[in-house]
Image: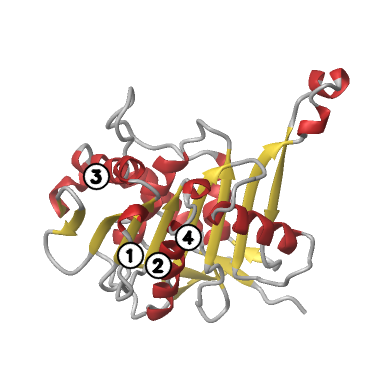
Amino acid sequence: MRKKRYTLGDDVAAWIETFCVHGPGDILGQPVELTRDERMFLKRAYEIDAEGNRVIRRAVRGLPKGSRKTEFAAWVALAEMAGPVRFGEWNDTERGWKPKGARVTDPYVVCAASTYEQADLLFAAARACITEGVLDGFFDCFDKEIQFKDGPGLLVRVPAVAGANDGLRPTFCVFDETHEWTGNKQRVHLVLENGLAKRAGAWSLSITTAGNPKVESVALSQYEYGTRVKNEEIADPGFLFDWRESSVSLDDLEDAEKLERPSSRRILSRGSAAMTSCAGSARFPFTSSPATT
């Protein structure tokens, strides 16, 4: 019998739309409006079980270029700093028991990319979200890290080319453009993910440009693993694989009929279970009590 699951994803989405703004670009400082796909991803990424434990430990998201993957990752990173991303308590509502989210105690958020330049893009999206919006009064932003003005909590920029410290204890890691994580950078990814085991409820989000990766990289390893999960060769309910790619393969590029009707397909694999949505309104980010985990 499948176990019933709940989600904090709606609360996280509401927090992002209330407190986050767009980063560098033509719509700098404008409020965020999440897409349907982004909302659905958050629902699945923030599933919890009946005991309030996080279900997803590793999430992989592959999307076409221009899908604002990096900016979305920055919003999730900021939510992991100050939003209702951990289970706090159960609320008795007319529709039954619903989970209420709480902040992470002493969050340590890692924004990682393969190069200094890509790490700067991810970090700049998070920093601009603070300096251009309502969160500005609650954080101190520096060149390589973001801190709470009052209380523990840190968001750091990590370029994989610089190596990684085995002693980190992150509560959340986001890995940007993982198809560029090749060679020794793959070990940096492994070191950072291993560090997540040191904190309760910690998880990672890897994002990359969709398509079947050909070069040996973190993206290729995750694509192959996610495909095996999709095909039920591996049972891993803690792995969320969200991949959108063209349905036209390289072998079909000379097939005029298939090229006339281009389409995309979405591969979505996770542990299957009934899921109840947590309908909650956005709250000021620093008023709810931190989670105990």
Horizontal side, residue 90 vs residue 24: left or right: right
* Mark 1 or mark 2, earlier in chain: 1
Callout 3–callout 4 Cβ contact below 8 Å = no
* Mark 4 or mark 1, earlier in chain: 1
Which mark identifies residue 146?
none
Estimate the spatial distance between the alpha carbons at disc 4 and disc 2, rounded to whole Å. Answer: 10 Å
Q: Position of residue 84 (x, y in %)?
A: 37, 63
Task: Specify few, some or many for label 1: CA neighbours under 10 Å numbering under 14, 14-19, or 20 or more.
Answer: some
Q: Which residue is mark 1?
A: 164
Quadrant location of the N terminus in the rendered image: bottom right
Q: Specify the amino acid type for callout 1.
A: Ala
* Mark 3 or mark 1, earlier in chain: 3
Say if residue 282 shows up in the picture. Answer: no
Q: Specify the amino acid type for callout 2.
A: Leu
Residue beneath the point at 74% across and 62% down:
228
Q: Which residue is mark 3?
A: 127
Quadrant location of the C terminus in the rendered image: bottom left
Q: Position of residue 150 (x, y in %)?
A: 12, 64
Horizontal side, residue 66 vs residue 71: left or right: right
Mark 1, mark 2: which one is toward the viewer?
1
Residue beneath the point at 37% across and 48% down:
75
Q: Specify the amino acid type for callout 4.
A: Gln
Horizontal side, residue 107 vs residue 7: left or right: left
Q: Which residue is mark 4?
A: 186
Residue beneath the point at 73% across and 70% down:
234
Q: Secondary structure at mark 1?
A: loop
Q: Which residue is mark 2?
A: 192
